[in-house]
Amino acid sequence: MTPDISVEIAGLSFKNPILTASGTCGYGEELADIFDLSQLGGIVTKTITMKPRDGHPSPRTAEASSGMLNAIGLANVGVDKFIEEKLTYLEKFDTRVVVNVAGTCTSDYVNLCARLNDHPRADMVELNFSCPNVDVGMEIATDAKLAEETVSKVKKVFSRPVIAKLSPNVTSIADIAVACENGGADAVSLINTLVGMAVDINTFRPRLTNNTGGLSGPAIKPVALACVFKVYKAVKIPIIGIGGISNYSDVIEFFLCGASAVQIGTTLFVEPDAPVKIVKELKKYLSKNKIESIRELTGKVRIYK
Amino acid sequence: MSKIVIENVSVVKKKKLTPDCFAITVAPFSKVKSIRPGQFVHLQIPNCNLFFRRAFSVYSVNTEEKSLEILFKVFGRGTAAMASLKKGNRLSLLGPLGSSFRKPKKNELIGLIAGGVGFPPIYYLSRFLIENGFDPKKLFFFYGGRGRSDLIELARLKKLGLNSVLVTEDGSLGIKGLVTSAVEKWFLENKGSKVVYSCGPEGMLKAVDQLAQQYNIPGQISLEAPMPCGVGICLGCIKPLKSGGYTRVCKEGPIFEIGEIIL
Ligand SMILES: Cc1cc2nc3c(=O)[nH]c(=O)nc-3n(C[C@H](O)[C@H](O)[C@H](O)COP(=O)(O)OP(=O)(O)OC[C@H]3O[C@@H](n4cnc5c(N)ncnc54)[C@H](O)[C@@H]3O)c2cc1C
Ligand SMILES: Cc1cc2nc3c(=O)[nH]c(=O)nc-3n(C[C@H](O)[C@H](O)[C@H](O)COP(=O)(O)O)c2cc1C
Ligand code: FES
């Protein structure tokens, strides 16, 4: 018996639960030189804004223990060029395309998603309510009411599933998740990066021109798991787990804590072909443990009472 | 087929060139044949607990042995750990990465300008050009450093049979001064079309870039930046473009045209 690793989110099927995370796989072109993108469950494209953005000046990444800091500043080609070139490029791959968007206010999100609604290659949108590096979207990330309102307005203009991507830099991530669910979100994805900082002791300068940045990579996995665990108890909509995933066992952990799919980010920088390996190893794990479908594992952590 | 691959390679040779400079050869790498001068590889260095890979220019290749050689200087933790690698140690190699030097026109005099650890890609280019039929007499290799200990692999350079000009700031070897002064003298003394290729510390590259523009000489420079991914997906290795915006050193570069980048 070959185990079933396909998953379903908001009525859409994914051939496997492995997606690449926004901002860590560009628009797919570079990874396609390394492996066939059709091997992915899906690709989440770099956050798109209405206008193109250059992002922050260099240095905007720094190495950290078991991870990294970044303050890229949402560098992207803008929605026009994205639709014209990048979305067209992705036509040829048999994988789900999730388009991540961000804006400074609710109407930006609505306008972006209205544009994308006309382009069915965008299977889903993911609302980036969580980038810690720019003013963009951060208010919505921390304000449950604003998040709910934004989701519900986007739902009126975008006819396919809408995912809300959540920040861990809040008092209660579960409260924001519930607000997004109430607004009509079809799924939530979490977590985005944790606010962090590093300083050069010779120059007294922060290692990022933005002074602070977002921490990602294996270092944040325990935090991400706890967030997924809390949100799973609070909402009924599916959760896409993100944060420090680098191998198949990390994926299983996220499923057990409540995820229905996962995204791989920073690991791609060190092992760009990691998704391919993880898919293979997931199948092996399921076979070995006689688990018919990975879907059975969601939320099955045996908690201590 | 994938253009870029990740493979485990073994150290097949290691040489200590100076107290802090080493050359290591690794094999087997299936893409050796497609590597071009200027390109680099991204190595995951074992036993040092660093999160990112480290980038190194390809110094030479051997297509029969499927091996490639890199030359490096100890800077920090990663390169220190590389210095203690032993024959037989295995490491993960991602490559080949980045852009490569373009071929000069047949009638051009070729200025090859290297400073410090900028030597490997310029040496590889010189060797590649000679192996591809360019007359060594038309190649002028300017090699600069602070003192004689910075000018490594001189015997190997000599074997190429090209014109070499050694320059040290303290005068301990060759001409005393800055390598760009020697290049300027060459510009003035030689009529006819010329092209330059350069790699070295950013200060030197900036001077070469300005000088070449001043004399209207075309050419290319090889840049460095800390590189989280090396394949163009993190947007961390950027440099500002003269035409506006940023470019990725790992993807559009590391080889850029003279005058293209704000240094
Ligand atoms: C395309 C490319 C080709 C290269 N080719 C060679 C080569 O052929 N031989 C060689 O010896 N080195 C080469 N380098 C540089 C080499 O990658 C660095 O020396 C190495 O990453 C340092 O790692 P480390 O862990 O020893 O030092 P770290 O502890 O990471 O850093 C030590 C110091 O160097 C700085 N630094 C680190 N990496 C870079 C960088 N890439 N650019 C500028 N500053 C940096 C750090 O900020 C720090 O101050 C190349 C770099 C690039 C980008
Ligand atoms: C360099 C970099 C750029 C990122 N850019 C974005 C982005 O544009 N939009 C977004 O929603 N998340 C962005 N993220 C966050 C990731 O998608 C992911 O949520 C986070 O890094 C945690 O996952 P990881 O530990 O697997 O990287 C970025 C992360 C990194 C490291
Ligand atoms: S190193 Fe990641 S984009 Fe260049």
Image (cartoon, rainbow, N blue to C red):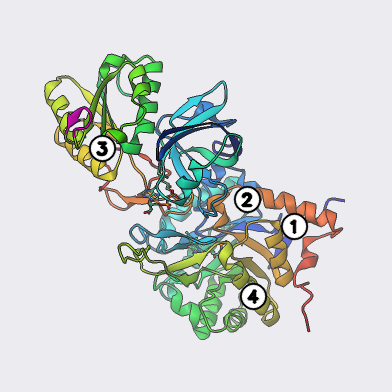
Q: Which residues are magenta?
A: B171-176
Chain of the residue that carries numbered disc 3 in the rendered image: B
Q: Residues within 10 Å of mark 2 (few under 14, many from 20)?
A: some
| Circles 2 and 3 in contact, beta carbons < 8 Å | no
Q: CA distance from mark 2 to mark 4?
A: 23 Å
Residue designated by label 1: A6
Chain of the residue that carries numbered disc 1 in the rendered image: A
Q: Residues within 10 Å of mark 3 (few under 14, many from 20)?
A: many
To the question of a shared chain for discs 2 and 4, the answer is yes
Chain of the residue that carries numbered disc 2 in the rendered image: A
Amino acid, disc 2: Ala
B118 or A122: nearer the eye?
A: B118
| Circles 2 and 1 in contact, beta carbons < 8 Å | no
Q: At numbered mark 4, what does the secondary structure look like: helix, strand or loop?
A: helix
Predominant secondary structure, magenta span = loop
Q: At numbered mark 2, what does the secondary structure look like: helix, strand or loop?
A: helix
In the displayed structure, A59 sits above or below B151; it is below
- Measured as percent of width and height from the top left, residue A145 is found at 52, 85
| Circles 3 and 1 in contact, beta carbons < 8 Å | no
Q: Quadrant of the N terminus of chain B?
A: top right
Residue B256 appears in the figure: no
Query: Upstream in the sequence, badge 2 or badge 1?
Result: 1
| Circles 1 and 4 in contact, beta carbons < 8 Å | no
- Measured as percent of width and height from the top left, residue A260 is found at 70, 66
Which residue is situated farthest in the left direction here?
B188
- Measured as percent of width and height from the top left, residue B141 is found at 27, 25
To the question of a shared chain for discs 2 and 1, the answer is yes
Tell me: is circle 3 under 8 Å from ligand 1.
no
| Circles 2 and 4 in contact, beta carbons < 8 Å | no
Q: State yes or no: residue B175 in magenta.
A: yes
Instruction: Report the disc number at residue B258.
Output: 3
Residue designated by label 4: A226
